[in-house]
Image (spheres, rainbow, N blue to C red):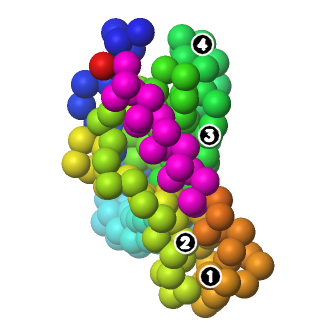
Amino acid sequence: MRDKETEKFERVGRSYILLVLAAGIILPLVASLIMCIVMGEIRVDLVLAMSLIFGIMIWIIMLMMIAWGNFSSLFVKKTAKEVDSLPYRFDSSFQGRGGILYIDMTNGMIGFISSYNPFKIQIFNASRIDRIETIASAMTGIRFVFYLDGKKITMPTLLTNRVVSTKSGIGAEAVSKADAFVEILKAAKARAEGRM
């Protein structure tokens, strides 16, 4: 099973960067060409001016979608369908803004599909993770955090645009969920270290 393990964690994939750049360049050009055709006048200066305007609008929209995790969610879901074909039995999974985390407690393995590398399932021995903790703040949200090969992975259990007390119903539930995943990750890490 070690042949499936990912050697180096890549939070952001090259193919994702190319996809974003291609969308950011091609979409404004296509939109400006369509507008010029509709107006009945295709001139280079008009196409360039409209491309600049559409480019600014499209980049703002794309950056918001990337930040919210909406831009790559379809790709992440498509890649997630391939998880069942892997030789691991993932007992627990968590889907957050940063991607989908899979945990195989039996074998001490972690699977991760990053929102910024949505075309690849990355598999790691749980012994490679450290500094696993819950961070609960009424101002910045509630999440569990761990480091994989020294790179921080944050999985929010509660994100909101308002202040939520960690002792309120929804806040306490989010803290409990984060604590549960911290314990699951620690157990998987202990299992992986015991198998080495």
Q: Please name whichever residue, 81 or 165, is drawn nearer the observer in this view of the structure.
A: 165
Seen in the image, is 82 located left or right of residue 151? right
Q: Please, what secondary structure does the residue beneath circle 1 have?
A: loop
The quadrant in which the C terminus is found is top left
Residue at 61% across, 69% down = 175
Where is residue 86? Give x, y as percent. 54, 14
Q: Earlier in the sequence, mark 1 or mark 4?
A: 4
- Where does label 2 land, which residue? 142
Instruction: State which mark lies toward you, 2 or 4.
Output: 2
> Is label 3 in a helix, a strand or a loop?
strand
Residue 39 vs 141, above or below: the answer is: above
As measured in the structure, the alpha-carbon distance from the residue carrying label 2 to the one carrying label 1 is: 8 Å
Q: Which residues are magenta?
A: 178-195
Q: CA distance from mark 4 to mark 3?
A: 16 Å
**Residue 44 spot, x, y in % from top left:** 32, 59
CA gap between label 3 and label 2 equals: 18 Å
Q: Is residue 118 visible?
A: no
Residue hosting label 4? 85
Residue 166, disc: 1
Between discs 4 and 3, the one toward the N terminus: 4
Foreground: 164 or 74? 164
Amino acid beneath label 1:
Thr
Q: Is residue 179 magenta?
A: yes
Q: Pinpoint residue 167: horizontal percent, then vertical percent.
A: 67, 84
Residue 124 place in picture, x, y as percent: 37, 29
